[in-house]
Amino acid sequence: MKKTAVKAAKPAKLTEEKLKPKLFSVIKNYSLSQFIKDVVAGIIVAIIALPLSIALALASGVGPEQGLYTAIVAGFIVALLGGSRVQIAGPTAAFATIVAGIVATEGMDGLIISTIIAGIILVIMGLCRFGALLKYIPSTITSGFTFGIAVTIVIGQIKDFLGLTFDFGRAEKLFGFTFKLDEAPIETVDKVKAVLLNIGSLNWQALVIGLLSLAILILWPKKLEKIPASLIAVVVCSLIVKFSGMHVNTIGDLYTISSDLPKLTLPEVSFARVKALLPNAFTIAVLAAVESLLSCVVADGMIGSKHRSNMELIAQGIANIGSALFGGIPATGAIARTAANVKNGGRTPVAGMVHSVVLLVILVLLIPLASLIPMPTIAAILFIVAYNMCGWRNIRNTIKTAPKSDIIVLFVTLILTVVFDLVVAIGIGLVLAALLFMKRMADVTEAHAWVDIDDEETDPDNILLKKIPDNTRVYEINGPMFFAAADKYKYMLDDKNIDVLCIRMRNVPAVDATGVEALYRIVKRCERHNVKVVFSHVNEQPMKAMQKAGLVKLVGKKNFCSHIDTALLRAEEIERDLRHA
């Protein structure tokens, strides 16, 4: 060993993010081979987006062509101006229940005004560089309202899946109470009541088509995934209903379908109307921002890039304004379609632009065929969308590994999303998360005299006075590890040419679920690079959280040391074992 003066590495100085579309950056080195890949990816994504856009439009209470208008207009604008290389935008399941509620209560004009205001809010957020502030929404709240939205989508599609006929005006006893359905239900709880009251009108033929659609969607071979299962389900079930004479509602039975190009629509606006619609607009803006940036983060991990969050917010804002003005509905980044774009070779915004152009061609030439699609097939597609978006695995892991306070926030947000709406759920969820976090901080805080740890002459544990083994790096974390600070630890393994990473946690009083997740990612990343991790002086609450999450078992108990001296001896032992291996 040698005496080494080592300072804990600091993250690189952050430069201000450019407000420049990603397309303008990547086009400089664009090649013909990449153009071909982008065109192929764009065509495949358009085929995937076709049935989804129609299904999500119907779930949102608007016509099928409105979903395509959204994918065409918003998809093109986000690709042109967005801050991600591969983001695909369009209608998403997260908006379905929100849009349906606005349309039912405020009409299409109310939706257009709400979406335009939301777009303006998003542009302001981007210009004010609020992209980084969205990390202050904890993952438990995101998981809670995402699962809640998935539940509302499933409940909203039961009617069409079972082929039920709602009998308005008829009173019936249910669980000892008399219920009456006077009009089409809007709230999720009312939809459950309506299904239970009218379950006797079940259409077995509709159920058979719904089950067949589900079977195709679930069992379609992965080897043929470039041909979307949803498209196969639509084609097969449409042909069966058309030529078998089955009594099953199709899109054409319930909606008038137009193949017209999107037209500019200007609603009547008044100050009173804008004021009344502000809560709806705020909901759309927050959800669009959160989902779009989450999609960008997922895409970054897949292609090894870095998105420009503020430019993405501006693009999403302009896209929503454009979508609303041309008859569409709110749009956001679609994680599933973005992932499909990446998997099929898309690496620049050109793929997203191609996807929009292909959908425009389909709208003009083929949209009348959409009238043949059975409603149970649409319901089955939305069931699968809801399953894919619900994130039940994240919720299961949170229940197993997170502190009780995080679990409470998750379930409160989930329940409020289903029973009330997203505004209530996010608002109360954030307040509850903040209160519980403050309580957690109060529980671990105590007042006593401390030596000046920055003074190497008075602090015997100062790292500058320690002997650091060769090929070992020591990092010290100061302060609580919680959701707002989770991205501060990404730099810990910038130097991969080491044998041991020692993480010193004497000044970490508490961690939450996101903090534990950050440590878990660091350990797994070290594992991939054959770097051993040793923890020093982990306090009581962080240790309990790490044990519950299985992190102690993953790292090994002997690699958790009570003092920095012990940790450095353990690091020396690991290096000695590696030399003799």
Image: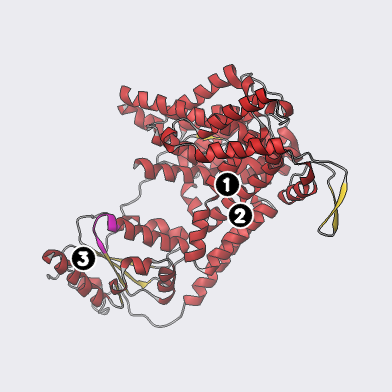
From the viewer's perspective, tell me whether residue 12 is left or right of residue 171.
left
Residue 67: name its quadrant.
Answer: top right
| Residue 538 visible here | yes
**CA–CA distance between discs 1 and 3?**
43 Å
Asked which secondary structure carries label 1, the reply is helix
| Front position in the image: 432 or 402 | 402
Residue 237 in picture, x, y percent from top left = 61, 30
Instruction: Please give the name of the residue rendered at 63% of the width and 50% of the height, measured from the top-left corner.
Output: 151
Task: Name above or below for residue 305 compared with residue 367.
Answer: below
Q: In which quadrant of the rendered image does the N terminus lie?
A: bottom left
- Specify start and end residues of the magenta stretch as a single range: 526-532
Instruction: Please give the name of the residue rendered at 57% of the width and 34% of the height, measured from the top-left corner.
Output: 52
Query: Mark 1 belongs to which amino acid?
Result: Val
Residue closest to the far bottom: 448
Q: Classify 10 Å Cα crowding around label 3: few (below 14), some (14-19), many (20 and above).
A: some
Q: Which residue matches tag 2?
A: 426
Give the colour scheme shown.
Answer: secondary structure
Whether 529 is among the magenta residues is yes
Instruction: Please give the name of the residue rendered at 11% of the width and 66% of the height, measured from the top-left corner.
Output: 580
Along the polypeptide, which appears first: circle 2 or circle 3?
Answer: 3
Residue closest to the far top: 365
From the viewer's perspective, tell me whether residue 455 is left or right of residue 387.
left
Residue closest to the far front: 244
Q: Which mark is residue 286?
A: 1
Residue 327: name its quadrant.
Answer: top right
Asked which secondary structure carries label 3, the reply is loop
Instruction: Please name which of the two marks, 2 or 3, marks the residue nearer to the observer.
Output: 2
Q: Which residue matches tag 3?
A: 6
